[in-house]
Image (spheres, coloured by chain):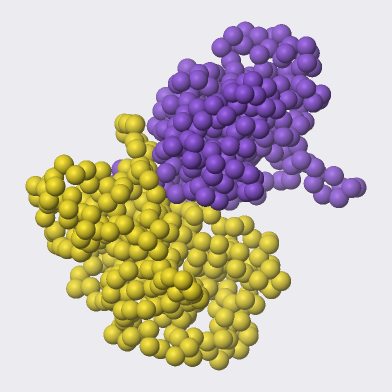
């Protein structure tokens, strides 16, 4: 495998590579916008770094437009990064071009999408969806493909598997289809699974089933999950680590309960105070009013400064750095300090 | 305004001598198909009092939106009301003529639905859409209508000058506010909100919910709030009704329903939402999926998914699988449709 991936290993980052399934450094994606002569760039993802470890779920939370799905798509190489490295087993795959290199990478890093209705071929039975990756990547000998399909269906709780294998997508419920998507991702025996809002289109009663399945698979297969979501309570339920994204940057990152129970960044605090939480009292305290500052188009400071009640002059002219304010708890804000 | 809303809030917190605004009585809505009839709403009775927020929850396909559409009489073929009455201040809406209904809607009852923000006409300025709506219901000069549009936008926290904006110039949250402002325009007594914030980010959702609550306290309208998000519903509602397979299976004040849910389905729904604070335990949600309403299970419709329908107690099992439980009162203001006896845990 090492021969087929473009050899751009970043030796400096090898320190944690023994335990990292995927190591992302300075990942950046700019989309171009505007006319041919007045090119503008949207900084959808800006200097994002993190490590996915085997047997852990890392949640990436944020509101729509924060760039969280773009990160997942960059990692799956559906998009090409503008800058930065994606280190997989000591090789940088962010620039890999050849079909073989991408195929081999994608057999190790699988993606699950939000819409279980759009990601399955309506005219093919379930067996087809699971057999295809097995054949393409040559995971098992042809004769054993059917047996492996049955095993996979069992693993994701689709029983009786023989019956399910013969069904067509429209005969399954949303939750069952999402289980098929997960089985398909598992088929190639990946090390990393990127799950982009896998439960947001499912009915409330079956969401937990999918989250529990993620937890079980993480244990059984020592998988590294990236769980992209806007549902913070579900992130708390499955994730070991949480990253909060705002306007293309990670603004807070740490162990789940450190970030969600003791948030430091004003944006994380705002987000958490907005989530319905009857446990905390039936009528919640009110949100602080929006600051509503106008940022200059050339604004280089904190991207949250226009909405932040705490913002001072520094926030407007200096881009804040992501600093470790408590052990393993990183925050991008010059105002908050460890208490 | 602030002092008024404080007074109003204390009043709203203790609904004294609530007068019924809407009484839904034994409502039945069926999808009349060539081969069969599917009962989407089955004998639903629900009272909405003036000035209260009543929550309606359940999984998708349980009939909550169909019930709301029936209330507004905007069901589309093949759905029809085939039984029951809907009384609005004592007047039966089911027997109204289309012209009566046209005048009735928007003036007395209005609707905000999930993708309402996409229902604005992209080619018309926001203000002109208010003018259209106002002129459809009363004789009003365009300039006056525009001025009122400005005031309404102001009410929901949008700059008056935005009357001249096109919908695409506004964010999703702002467009949803515009639709709420339109729903308020003729000062209806009831606003039906069907998943009004589901498509929005949490911070925007919270801002809009606060807005709705303040406006409700100020203007005194009632809200029928429909969502699948129990955490949200418990926070915003005064009372909550839980629907399953076309029926109301439990109804109680929000706090009671949250602290002491009785129906196994409600218990399951409540434990489908992981907590944001406190201890994290392995949770299980509800096994299985809702029944096909064209062929519902006999007896209690929840019995195939019910953790208490095990057959251990033969007499109870017999009841659960053959007899439909009726909504009964187990405490003041607390109704449950279930065969379990909530005093001892056996059969009722």
Colour for chain B in the figure: yellow
Residue A196 visible to an observer of this rendering: no
Q: Name above or below for residue A309 compared with residue B67.
A: above
Q: Name above or below for residue B3 compared with residue B137.
A: above
Residue B10 percent location from the top left of the image: 26, 63
Residue A202 percent location from the top left of the image: 48, 47
Considering the image in quadrants, where does the C terminus of chain A appear?
A: top left
Q: Name the outermost residue toward the left.
A: B344
Residue drawn 81% across the image and 24% down it: A98
Q: Is residue B347 left or right of residue B171?
A: left
Residue drawn 90% across the image and 47% down it: A37
Residue drawn 61% across the image and 89% down it: B141
Q: Is residue A3 left or right of residue B56?
A: right
Colour for chain A in the figure: purple
Task: Please name whichever residue, A249 or B232, is drawn nearer the observer in this view of the structure.
Answer: B232
Considering the image in quadrants, where does the N terminus of chain A appear?
A: top right
Q: Quadrant of residue B68?
A: bottom left
Q: Name above or below for residue A90 compared with residue B49.
A: above
Residue A310 percent location from the top left of the image: 52, 39
Residue drawn 24% across the image and 58% down it: B299
Q: Name the outermost residue toward the right.
A: A37
Q: Name the outermost residue toward the front.
A: A143
Residue B186 visible to an observer of this rendering: yes
């Amino acid at each position: 495998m090492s021969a087929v991936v473009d050899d751009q290993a970043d030796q400096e980052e090898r320190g944690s590579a023994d335990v990292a399934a995927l190591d992302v450094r300075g990942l950046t994606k700019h989309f171009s916008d505007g006319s041919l002569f007045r090119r503008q760039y949207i900084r959808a993802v800006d200097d994002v770094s993190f490590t996915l470890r085997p047997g852990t779920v890392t949640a990436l939370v944020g509101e729509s437009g924060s760039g969280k799905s773009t990160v997942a798509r960059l990692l799956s190489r559906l998009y090409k990064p503008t800058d930065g490295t994606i280190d997989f087993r000591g090789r940088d795959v962010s620039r890999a071009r050849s079909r073989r290199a991408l195929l081999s990478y994608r057999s190790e890093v699988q993606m699950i999408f939000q819409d279980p209705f759009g990601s399955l071929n309506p005219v093919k039975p379930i067996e087809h969806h699971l057999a295809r990756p097995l054949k393409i990547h040559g995971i098992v000998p042809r004769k054993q493909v059917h047996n492996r399909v049955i095993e996979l269906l069992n693993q994701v709780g689709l029983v009786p598997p023989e019956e399910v294998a013969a069904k067509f997508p429209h005969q399954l419920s949303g939750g069952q289809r999402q289980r098929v998507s997960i089985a398909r991702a598992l088929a190639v025996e990946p090390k990393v699974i990127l799950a982009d809002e896998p439960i947001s289109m499912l009915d409330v009663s079956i969401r937990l089933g999918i989250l529990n399945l993620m937890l079980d698979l993480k244990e059984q297969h020592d998988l590294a999950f990236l769980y992209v979501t806007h549902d913070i309570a579900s992130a708390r339920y499955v994730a070991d680590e949480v990253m909060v994204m705002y306007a293309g940057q990670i603004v807070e990152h740490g162990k789940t309960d450190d970030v969600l129970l003791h948030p430091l960044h004003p944006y994380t605090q705002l987000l958490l105070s907005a989530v319905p939480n009857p446990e905390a009292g039936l009528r919640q305290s009110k949100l602080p009013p929006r600051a509503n500052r106008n940022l200059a188009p050339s604004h280089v400071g904190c991207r949250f400064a226009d909405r932040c009640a705490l913002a001072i002059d520094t926030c407007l002219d200096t881009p804040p750095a992501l600093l470790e304010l408590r052990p393993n708890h990183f925050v991008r804000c010059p105002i908050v300090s460890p208490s | 305004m602030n002092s008024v809303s404080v007074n109003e809030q204390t009043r709203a917190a203790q609904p004294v001598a609530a007068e019924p605004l809407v009484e839904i009585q034994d409502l039945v809505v069926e999808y009349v198909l060539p081969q069969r009839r599917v009962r989407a709403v089955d004998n639903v009775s629900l009272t909405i009092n003036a000035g209260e927020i009543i929550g309606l929850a359940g999984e998708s396909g349980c009939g909550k939106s169909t019930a709301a559409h029936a209330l507004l009489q905007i069901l589309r073929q093949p759905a029809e009301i085939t039984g029951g009455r809907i009384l609005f201040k004592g007047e039966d809406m089911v027997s109204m003529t289309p012209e009566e209904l046209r005048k009735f809607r928007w003036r007395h009852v209005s609707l905000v639905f999930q993708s309402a923000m996409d229902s604005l006409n992209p080619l018309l300025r926001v203000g002109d859409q208010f003018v259209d709506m106002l002129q459809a219901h009363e004789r009003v000069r365009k300039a006056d209508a525009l001025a009122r549009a400005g005031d309404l936008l102001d009410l929901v926290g949008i700059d008056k000058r935005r009357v001249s904006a096109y919908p695409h110039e506004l964010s999703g949250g702002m467009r949803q506010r515009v639709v709420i402002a339109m729903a308020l325009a003729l000062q209806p007594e009831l606003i039906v909100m069907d998943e009004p914030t589901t498509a929005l980010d949490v911070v925007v959702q919270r801002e809009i919910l606060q807005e709705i609550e303040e406006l409700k306290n100020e203007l005194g309208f009632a809200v029928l709030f429909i969502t699948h998000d129990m955490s949200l519903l418990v926070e915003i509602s005064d009372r909550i009704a839980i629907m399953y397979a076309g029926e109301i299976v439990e109804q109680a004040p929000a706090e009671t329903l949250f602290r002491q849910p009785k129906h196994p389905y409600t218990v399951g729904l409540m434990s489908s939402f992981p907590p944001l604070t406190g201890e994290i335990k392995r949770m299980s949600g509800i096994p299985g999926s809702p029944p096909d309403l064209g062929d519902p299970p006999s007896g209690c419709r929840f019995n195939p998914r019910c953790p208490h329908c095990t057959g251990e107690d033969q007499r109870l099992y017999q009841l659960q699988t053959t007899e439909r439980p009726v909504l009964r009162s187990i405490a003041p203001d607390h109704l449950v449709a279930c065969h379990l006896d909530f005093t001892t845990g056996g059969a009722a």
